[in-house]
Amino acid sequence: MDSVAQSLSSVGAGAALELRGVTRLFGALAALTDITMTVLAGERRAVLGSNGAGKTTLFNCITGDFPPSSGTIRFFGEDVTNFPPYERIRRGLRRTYQISSLFPGLTVHDNVYLACRGVSRGRFSFIRAHARDALMQAAEQLVQAVHLTAVRDRKVAELAYGQQRQLEIALALAGAPRFVLFDEPAAGLSPTERQELVVILTSLPQHIGYIVIEHDMDVALRVVESVTMMHNGRIFKQGTPQEIESDPEVQELYLGVGHG
Amino acid sequence: MALVERPPRTATAAPAWTPSVNPAFALVAIILVFLPAVASDFVLVQIFAWSYMLGIIALSLMFLAGYGGMVSLAQITLAGLAGYLMAILGVNGQPGGLGWPWGIATLVAILVTMVFGAIVGALAVRTEGIYMIMITLAIAAAFFYFTNENYAIFNGHTGINAIPTPHVFGVDWHAPVPFYFLTLVIAGLCWAAVSYISRTPFGLALQGLRDNPRRMAALGFNVNAHRIAAYVFAAFLAALGGVLLVWSYGEIAPGTISVSAAIDILVIAVVGGLGNPIGPFIGALIYALLKTFALDFLVAVGLDGNRYRLLIGLGFLVIVFWSPDGVIGLWERWRRRGETSQRRQGGGGHG
């Protein structure tokens, strides 16, 4: 509630995410240079670019996995630049990982339960949760929502690849997400699974905005209303999917290679 | 009706969340409770009570390493600190013992040890893997040399002796059978507590940290705070083990908390198995048996009795080579093999 009040009272109330001059250096290498972008609440955007363009580094800066070397990041109006990742997550930011980042030694249900517990009170509870506990129920529903009920008591290490990708998304949707960063959610999925993914993304509640990094244009351009192109750690082009698709420079740099 | 009509076991019945009584555990519990009827005082105290005490300290390491993925060599140090504090605050044979009542001395000793555990944890969780082992080893070595050299508080190399075991309810708890039951009950409670906590939000989060700390942070968990809390709980367990050790020996000296003792705790936990809270107790029993009988065994086969550590080391090597997850891992594989062969026999018709 605090963060909602803060975001309403601040200047950029309509923006979910505001980046100002975000730069990230790894030694002498600039992985990100002077990124300035605003994503509105509920907006859905794709970040495109070739390998090494800085897309995942951008995500890592937004979530706080790596702090930016300079620049500021605001989340719903609140300056979160120096917040540790968990403080940003508790304010409604979520992310998925390009390579599934799960808890292989725990069951599917326990994975989702941890995700639900992480954004609510009682993280340090020494009392076992009852099956009728609200968070246990919430975890159960999420497991159902990503079609994993049949394997809910299996250890994640035993799941098929596609199931792990579904679980990856379930973890990011636990609690009350306000903005989600999807890092190549379609990577390694079959064409059918990609269709399911498009359905999952487009059927998210309207107020949940997201940024999706995706190499598959058929997926990316169907689930977003705006596109940011990155190249060598800089923003190269921004626009609607149609504008980006028809932009000659973009075609030469990225789409031409991608479709070839 | 309720007896006959059981609800159908569906996938949503959550078997993992309900405690189940394993018949093997029930059998072991019965044997341990009735052991004093048949076993000698020597076996009760020198083998079993000692195993329970070492097991509790090794359990504190199992909790950190098995659930949290954090290997600490400072658990015997925490146990020793609790023992020293209880000795210094309470009644002992040295001039300068504060002579507090044993209950208060013990309580304060355990609480201060938990605070020290938080400090050790706060230092250790800044690192991972081999660096955490090195930091905790450094703490263990530093505390050992400190107690060894410091005469004002710790009475140096001699340590502190003539520490009485409390008499409560008219029972002399230092007598073999009462002491056996005291250690059995406390070890049983520690085992039950760790088993219970492994399925609580705190315990699950700890296992999440073991598997993937970065994702835990990305789910809203304060990774370091959780790890430090785990160190505090582990320090509580180690402190209980340390207090019992002092009551058992009636003394505490630097030898109890030497670096080789720290490694023994690691060996016990690894040999027993880090995957299950019963593992450390199995490891401790094997260790106590080897340490007690290896010398006699070596002499009997015509070898130098002083080489008993060699036998312990060989036993360690054999178990770890055979089963990296310790004796408990062997048991689980054997049980699973039984299950799969059953399934093959029973389910053959279904293809």
Image: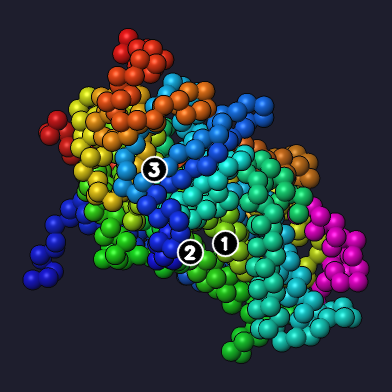
Quarter of the picture holding the C terminus of chain A = top left
Q: Are marks 1 and 3 on the same chain?
A: no
Real-space Cα distance between discs 1 and 2? Answer: 8 Å
Instruction: Report the residue marked by disc 2.
Output: A124
Residue sitting at 52 percent across and 23 percent down? A232
User: Which SS class for mark 1?
Assistant: helix
Kind of residue at badge 2: Phe
Q: Which mark is residue B198?
A: none
Instruction: Report the residue marked by disc 1.
Output: B229
Kind of residue at badge 3: Val
Q: Quadrant of residue B253?
A: bottom right
Type of colouring: rainbow
Q: Which residues are magenta?
A: B140-162
> Quick check: can you spot residue B229?
yes
Instruction: Report the residue marked by disc 3.
Output: A39
Residue sitting at 40 percent across and 55 percent down? A13
